[in-house]
Amino acid sequence: MVTFVGRPPVPDPATVLVVGAGPVGLTAAHELARRGVRVRLVDAAPGPARTSRAVAVHPRTLETFDQMGVAEPVLASGRHNKAFTMYAGGRRLVRLEADYSTMPTRFPFTVVIEQTRTEELLREACGRLGVTVEWDVRLTGFSQDADGVRARLEHGDGRAEEYPAAWLVGCDGGHSTVRKELGLPLIGESSETWELADAQVSMDLPPDTIYWVHTGGQALMMVPYQREGHWRLLDTAPVARPGIASPAQARESAARFEERLSAGLGREVRVGEPEWSSVFTFQQRMVPAMHEGRVFVAGDAAHVHSPASGQGMNTGIQEAYNLAWKLAMVARGQAGRPLLATYGQERVPVGRRLLGSTRQATFLVQLKNALAGVMLPAVFSVVRGAPPLRRAIQRKVLGGMSGLLLDYPDSPLTTTGGGLRPPAGSRAAAVAAGLPAGPAATALHAELRDPRWTLLYAPDGDGASLTAEGAAAAAGDWLSVRAVGARPGTAPAPLPDPGGVLRDALGLASGGWVLIRPDGYLAASGPELTGRRLTRALDVLGPVPLQRSSVGSPAPADTVEATTRVLEGRR
């Protein structure tokens, strides 16, 4: 073990140790590194996972990947699913098509992709930023104080290491060492035992939908992969014991799936021996808090639940993205510590709602009641004959699964009452998706990929430009300031808006402004851009952003004086 003589060294304030190299840890590492923070990423496994639990990347996560710059390879590597079809007792009950008309997005579909491939693409993205995974390195414990965290690491060769870091992020799964060391309880209940399998399937139904199949006393699901003939299979009433199946068990599993799917779909189904299958007992639990001091948890380390709606990985990725930009600002001296409290304030309620929605989804997927075979045809005959009801069900299901309805209206980072047409706390990506194809839409999508805050303003010729320029100078490199629709040369950093379509979408009159968080949520707006109003909107960041022009360097006195006058409204 590394030992320190005297007081252990104070860790570099911009060093973060991320434990766990699944999709959540990789997202956290990528976003921290993209913002200039030094990251060390370790995982106890000997190498990348060879099996996939999660297979669905939902629309809000695709928007997040787009902001990260990794959406294109994910889109190219998976099947785009836009439908959900239900069968019972050999009869097709209903096919629900994706309807995102009330939830504008550039990605109106779910991408079905093996988790192993998602992780591979994220590792490649991290590698481009200089972050590589250290495999076979296990966190065995840690201590923390006001200066930092000292993590105890054990390498695969038996070597012990004590590593000083400024911050620790635990993305180490349902059996999280970080969560246990913090003493955070998982609150909730145990639930059901299900079986997952990946196998080749031969049948005369098209792979253009997810299939839900009820057989009278149990339910199964089939999810099509991009690879022709390959499917993810789920059985809610397995007979095998928990764990990865042996070859003999895998053959038995294939025979069971074949028999049950044939009965439920009313046609011959052939299932090949699974590439892998696993019987597992899932739980519905979450932590009451997501950080303590300098240590945080995200993903399955913070909540475990049913895979019924495919939200576990998606929620964890969005948590990591939420945390990373906040932690990066604090680590780089761009914001005060109070900003970190908003991570739990925003995400604990999301986890609580997630448990409720997955509990409902689990009930709907299972439907083990024998009466379901009688009730389901009757229920869905009504649904088929009532288009408004059908559309309402589609939007309700999609809204819960997609993540597109997630917003932060009650966050300390949200300032309401500014007259913004989309309400503060909602997704800026929805505004971008609602614009007609053209320069404004292209420019706004590109701006959302910027890792900084964004201030959009409509120049009025009477001070708005001056205030925006002062805010940019005061903030340094954490704020992007764009003049919407300004002609080149008339204002710094104009954002094209031919025909004023973006101004109209945001409800921006001359002199108006909109503030967008680094994770793409609308934070505040107003009819007149003044330093006082902008300062109030950024109050939760603390005084640091207005006192520094670059990381770790005080702004020149004349710059501070000039920008302070602007930000106090003294033009």
Image (tube, helix red, strand yellow):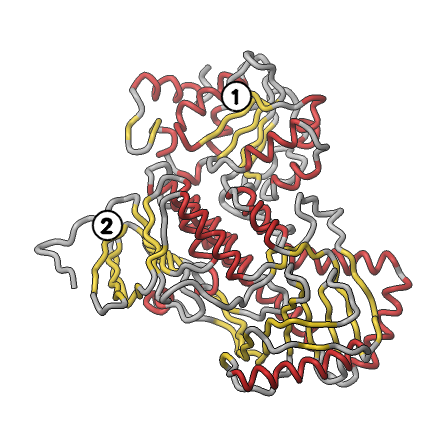
C-alpha distance separating marks 2 and 1: 39 Å
From the image, which quarter does the N terminus lie in? bottom left
Percent across and percent down for residue 183 are 35, 68
Q: Is residue 117 above or below residue 177?
A: above
The label number, if any, that marks residue 147 in the structure image: 2
Percent across and percent down for residue 39 are 34, 49
Find disc 1 in the rendering and name its residue.
493
Q: Amino acid at mark 1?
A: Ala
Left or right, 467 with respect to 211, comes to: left
Residue positioned 44% across, 52% down in the render:
123
- Is tag 2's residue or tag 1's residue first in the polypeptide sequence? 2
Secondary element under disc 1, as helix, strand or loop, is: loop
Badge 1: how crowded within 10 Å, few (<14), some, or many (20+)? some
Residue positioned 52% across, 47% down in the render:
411
Residue lying furthest left in this view? 5
Q: Amino acid at mark 2?
A: Asp
Secondary element under disc 2, as helix, strand or loop, is: loop
Q: Nearer the viewer, residue 427 or 523?
A: 427
Percent across and percent down for residue 383 are 85, 65
**Image quadrant of residue 3?**
bottom left
**Image quadrant of residue 366?**
bottom right
Percent across and percent down for residue 423 are 64, 40
Left or right, 558 with respect to 21, comes to: left
